[in-house]
Amino acid sequence: MLRINPYLNFNGNTEEAFNFYKSVFGGEFRMLMRFKDTPEAGNIPADARNQIMHVALPLGKNNVLMGTDAPESMGFGLKVGNNVHIAIHTESREEADKLFKGLSAGGKVQMPMADMFWGDYYGSFTDKFGVQWMISFNKQG
C-alpha cells in the first residue's frame, strides 16, 4: 500500500473547513475541484454546483487530508458516523481489486472498482462493521 488517508464529508462547508485546516497545518491544496467542474456538471443540482467535489491538503511528507461536500440534493444523508472514510491508495490495480474484494465482503458497495474521469481506478463501500472505505490506484502515484 502506498498511503492511507482520512477522507471527510461535510454538509456544504467543506471549503470553510479546509481553509481552516490549511491555516493550521499550512501548505497549499494539491487539488480543489467543484461539482460544476466535473463532466457531469449538467446533471448536478443547482444548489450543489459550486460546492466542493474533492479537495486535498498535503500534511507532511506522505499524508493527505481529503474531503468533499455531501449535498442532500444529490442523495447524500450526512450524519456523524458517515462523515469519515478511510482512503487507501494502492500500488497496483491488482492490489486495489484484492483489498476491495476482501474488505467489502459482507458489506455494502457504493461504487464498484472502475476507471474514473479524474484518472483513478476507484471504488467505495461500507464494510460489514459499518466502516467506510475508498480504494484507489493511480499510475502517477
Image: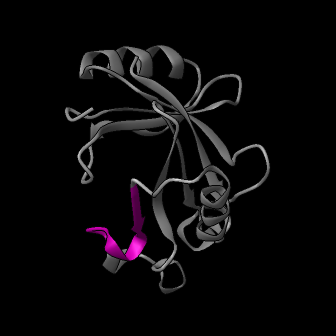
The extreme front residue here reads 26
Find residue 7 and report its image quarter. top right
Q: Is residue 21 magenta?
A: no
The extreme right residue here reads 80
Q: Examine the rendered structure and indicate whether residue 101 appears above or below residue 107.
A: above
Query: What residue is shown at x 33% (from left), y 20% (from top)?
Result: 97
Q: How many marks?
A: 0
Q: Position of residue 71 (x, y in %)?
A: 59, 69
Q: State which quarter of the image contains the N terminus.
A: top left
Describe the colour scheme in one phrase: one colour
Query: What residue is shown at x 45% (from left), y 79% (from top)?
Result: 49
Q: Is residue 62 left or right of residue 96?
A: right
The extreme left residue here reads 139
Q: Position of residue 42 (x, y in %)?
A: 32, 80
Find residue 59 and report its image quarter. top right
Span colored in magenta: 31-40
Q: Is residue 57 left or right of residue 16?
A: left
Q: Nearer the viewer, residue 136 or 62?
A: 62
Find residue 73 and report its image quarter. bottom right
Q: Nearer the viewer, residue 101 or 17?
A: 17
Q: Position of residue 8 (x, y in %)?
A: 62, 49
Query: What residue is shown at x 37% (from left), y 14% (from top)?
Result: 98
Q: State which quarter of the image contains the C terminus.
A: top left
Q: Examine the rendered structure and indicate whether residue 71 appears above or below residue 112.
A: below
Query: What residue is shown at x 48% (from left), y 80% (from top)?
Result: 50
Q: Nearer the viewer, residue 124 or 35?
A: 35
Q: Position of residue 83 (x, y in %)?
A: 69, 49
